Amino acid sequence: MQPQSKPNNPNFSSGPCSKRPGYDVSALQLDTLGRSHRSSLGKEVLARACSLTAELLGLPEGYRVGIVPGSDTGAVEMAMWSMLGQRGVDVLAWESFGSGWVTDIIKQLKLDNVRVMEADYGLLPNLAEVNFANDVVFTWNGTTSGVKVPNGDWIADDREGLTICDATSAVFAMDLPWEKLDVVTYSWQKVLGGEGAHGMLILSPRAVERLESYTPSWPMPKLFRMTKGGKLVEGIFRGETINTPSMLAVADYVDALEWVQSIGGVSEAIKRSEANLAVIEKFVAENDWINFLAASKETLSNTSVCLTLKADADQVKAFVKLLDKEGVAYDIGAYRDAPAGIRIWCGATVESADLEALMPWMTWAYQQVTA
């Protein structure tokens, strides 16, 4: 029978992701609207976005936080175009975004000394084979495959190269070993449920040293330039953005940060995400027609949870469309490059009760499309 109870919030998209519980746009602090981002007020709010980020994440001494254009993609591109080329590169790819970084490194930057380490959707490359004499580019969590690296134990403490980590669906949801990460990027519209267009760039002292000691051979677009006269432009990491940010989106981001602070910090945000995953794990264990795309529990993402169904591609599409039509789950189809299936966002802004309400609807929808 068709279930009666529906999720209070049916937004399970993997980006832009659900707003935090209790979100009210009218409650945002909007005194920056209509003001220059270079005004004293604008700089103050932008600087607070950077400093509160560093405080909540517990970043080590000397790490810098900057707001950059182009969402997570822009942040990753800035790092690669500004820092790669000094030494060899190991680039890891096991889903679409990692594959995109491979394309940029080989076809756009045209670097020669590159090792590409790939794995199919659901799997990870052999992390033991990574050469840390090289720079290493990887995603922490494969947003389109639902596969994450299990921890940072595989990253060498005595590495010679830099680790450049695309962590857009991991920051604020997974425990990151900051001392092993030299460049970390993410966007507001993932775990925090913020708005798009802006990215976050976190640099270790080792990354800063690279920027100040190495100049790439290629022309550097203005939006990517982080140094002047051989020195880091420190203003970028104090809220003096390279280009004009949306102060409305900034206010929304600060609201999300303050929500994380109010629930007890990043550790509580991680617990919320893991509790959400547990709801789906229980459901999968009880039903033989659905399974995780991730091949092992150790690498199972607790944010972008990707699932396969015992159904053909057309039936999967009908399943997704039916849940959308009933208003119980929006935007849960698998990413366009991924195997046919569904993807349910389980980040901290999602309530476990909504996932619990969704599960019976999943059974009902599956029965409808496979009858």
Image: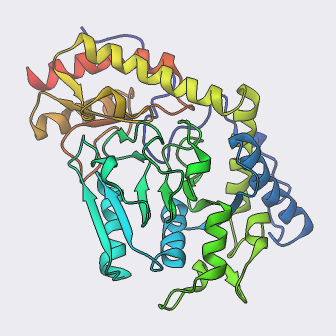
Quarter holding residue 63: bottom right
Query: Could you tell me if residue 21 is visible in this image?
Result: no
Quarter holding residue 12: top left
The x, y position of residue 329, in whole percent, is: 38, 30
Q: Name the residue furthest right.
A: 40
In which quadrant of the rendered image does the C terminus lie? top left
Residue at image coords 63%, 81%: 213
In which quadrant of the rendered image does the N terminus lie? top left
Residue at image coords 78%, 60%: 46
Count of marks overlaid on the render: 0
Q: Is residue 303 above or below residue 156?
A: above
The x, y position of residue 166, in whole percent, is: 48, 55
For the residue pair 147 and 210, the one nearer the viewer reads as 210
Residue at image coords 59%, 79%: 223
Q: Is residue 61 left or right of residue 101?
A: right
The x, y position of residue 369, in whole percent, is: 14, 26
Query: Could you tell me if residue 12 is visible in this image?
Result: yes
The figure's colour scheme reads: rainbow
Quarter holding residue 138: bottom left
Q: Is residue 276 above or below residue 98?
A: above
Q: Is residue 370 left or right of residue 152?
A: left
For the residue pair 136 and 300, the one nearer the viewer reads as 136
The x, y position of residue 323, in whole percent, is: 30, 29
Q: Name the residue furthest front.
A: 158
For the residue pair 340 and 23, the one nearer the viewer reads as 340
Residue at image coords 48%, 72%: 80
Q: Is residue 74 left or right of residue 345?
A: right
